[in-house]
Amino acid sequence: MAEPILKVKKLTKKYGDKTVVKGISFEVKKGEIFGILGPNGAGKTTTLEMIETVREIDGGSATVDGIDVAKHPQKVKYIIGVQPQSPAFMDKVKLTEQLEQMASTYGSRVNTKELLKDVGLEDKASSYVEQLSGGQKQRFSIVASLVHQPKIFFMDEPTTGLDPQARRNLWELVEHVRDQGTTVILTTHYMEEAEMLCDRVAIMDDGNIVAIDTPKNLVKKLLAKGFTKKQHVEQANLEDVFIDLTGKELKD
Amino acid sequence: MKKKFLPVFVFAKIAIRRAFRDKTALFFIVLFPLIFLFVFGGIFAHDNGTSFKVALINQSDSQFAKQFVDQAKANKLLKIDAKSTTLDQAKEKMSRGQMDAAIILPSDFGTVKNGQYPSGNAKVYYTNNSQQAGQALTSILQSEFQSINKQFVKVETPFTASSEQLTTKGLTQFDYVFAGLLGFSIVGLGIFGPVNVFPELKKQGVLRRLHTTPIRVWQYFLANVGSQSIVGLFSIAVQFVVAITVFHLHVAGNYAELTVFIILSITTILGIGLAVGGWAKNEQQAAPLANLIVFPMLFLSGTFFPRFLMPEWLQKVSAFLPLTPVIDGIRLITTEGKHLWQIGPQVGLLAIWLVIIYAIAFQVFRWE
């Protein structure tokens, strides 16, 4: 087993007298795609934000690659990449300029054209972010968060609002990022996304982690408890029909 | 060390490019100040010295009265309103402050009564709004008549007074107002710029994204100072070109020193914008606070009218506002040709404000 790149111990966040993250602990191994699932308001985003150094930690600790987040936030910033929920780019700034800006914050210069080529946006080098489609924006957002080749990459609901083609394309991209040696931690609402993409998932509810395991084991445990679902076996579902009719290729 | 300034240069460079791509931003950088320049330039450019707006109502048909009217029309001190032909019309305009006085030449004005020479009494009417103008006008007419009288009657005048205008540098009112207009555009750029942009960037999460990167607040602020200084200098250069070519602005000072002083001014005033925009969570917080700071400062610092018109105590207080040394310093360099070391009080006061304002701005800055 690979050593953990992220260790979270009894992490706590309070807003006034409301505790939104209630002392959660978990570890993420190097090279994993780790999913955090849960309904809205479960504390997923707050948890990520504390590890990402942008939200103060009220209790417990988070350690990224051996560095304590609360003690050395500036050091942690150099080894993490963050993709926010919304693309969050200034308008009227070319894609190449956006990448140049992101890289400069780490004190480095990058080959912006090469980076754009990796995500199939080389034709859009001189476009502005506001001229891109939803899927293109997400792909660009990912490449912008990875200009400094971080050790851990955080993605907050990366596929929300995307069409099935764009979503599948993004999954491939996430796997590609992982294959390059970056650990990926993402939040999602889509169970099927977690099942297909994540090596392990943590399920959060009301500020607590209620389960943590591989998707397969979680299903096994549920079945072991004697759970049965109305059996209704079909060889395909509506999404398969949609993909079959409209093709797998990206539309934008 | 070089790495620390890389984001400063990159962010500043891209912000400048962005300003010139954005049509709305360009409007506020270039056209908006020019509109003010043309409005104030139109008011003050040709108004060199004093003049009186008067109605000249001639009720006499005499040759002398006609000649008098023609002469009065040629007189630069008098601006004769041709539309007012009766005393009532003139009174109405005087009551609204649009006119200083009415001169009435009665029907017997300039007629020859004693068979020797024409005589008459011109009457000057004025209201208590324009006492000074009315009295000045009366004495002007008096002396005018005295020289006419000499042609008819020989009188020895033992004592006389004469006046002569000293034109040393030939400062027009426009030269004076121009510094105020530059102060106004520095406020627009330095305060309303970040106040409008920052809450928007926070809403879009742009600043939050930056917060996850190692960029420091000082690097981000310094990038803003750099880009706003370049954009501001461009805007001010355009205003100078228009002021010199269209309104015959007299520039006595040195452009290099003026540039240095303007960069210092933009940096200081921008700090107010960075503090307000950086503190505010959204536009609802940013706009009222910015207005609360900007409008009193604009009026008290002599942007639109000179501070020497204010009551003494107000002049003393307003001298310490951050915008006052900006406007005074620009005026002293531009029109009076002062050097930076000669405007120590202005430079010093700005430097003090710079420290205070940025100390606050760093304290209150929020990334989201």
Image (cartoon, coloured by chain):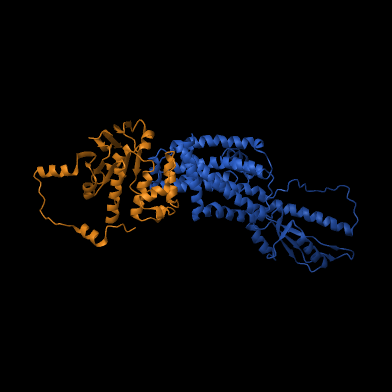
Quadrant of residue A27 within the rendered picture: top left
Q: Which residue is outermost to the bottom? A: B61
Image side of residue B225 versus residue A135, left or right? right
Q: Is residue B148 visible?
A: yes
Residue A210 in percent (x, y) is at 19, 39
Q: Nearer the viewer, residue B26 or B184?
A: B26
Q: Nearer the viewer, residue B192 or A233?
A: A233
Identify the residue shown where x is 27% and y is 55%. Answer: A164
Residue A228 in percent (x, y) is at 9, 48
Identify the residue shown where x is 81% and y is 56%. Answer: B144
**What is the display colour for chain A?**
orange
Residue B6 in percent (x, y) is at 48, 39
Image side of residue B223 versus residue A84, left or right? right
State how many labels appear: 0
Q: Which residue is outermost to the left? A: A226
Q: Nearer the viewer, residue B251 or A175?
A: A175
Residue A224 in percent (x, y) is at 10, 42
Quick one: quadrant of the C terminus of chain B?
top left
Q: Is residue B192 visible?
A: no
**What is the display colour for chain B?**
blue
Q: Nearer the viewer, residue A188 or A80?
A: A80
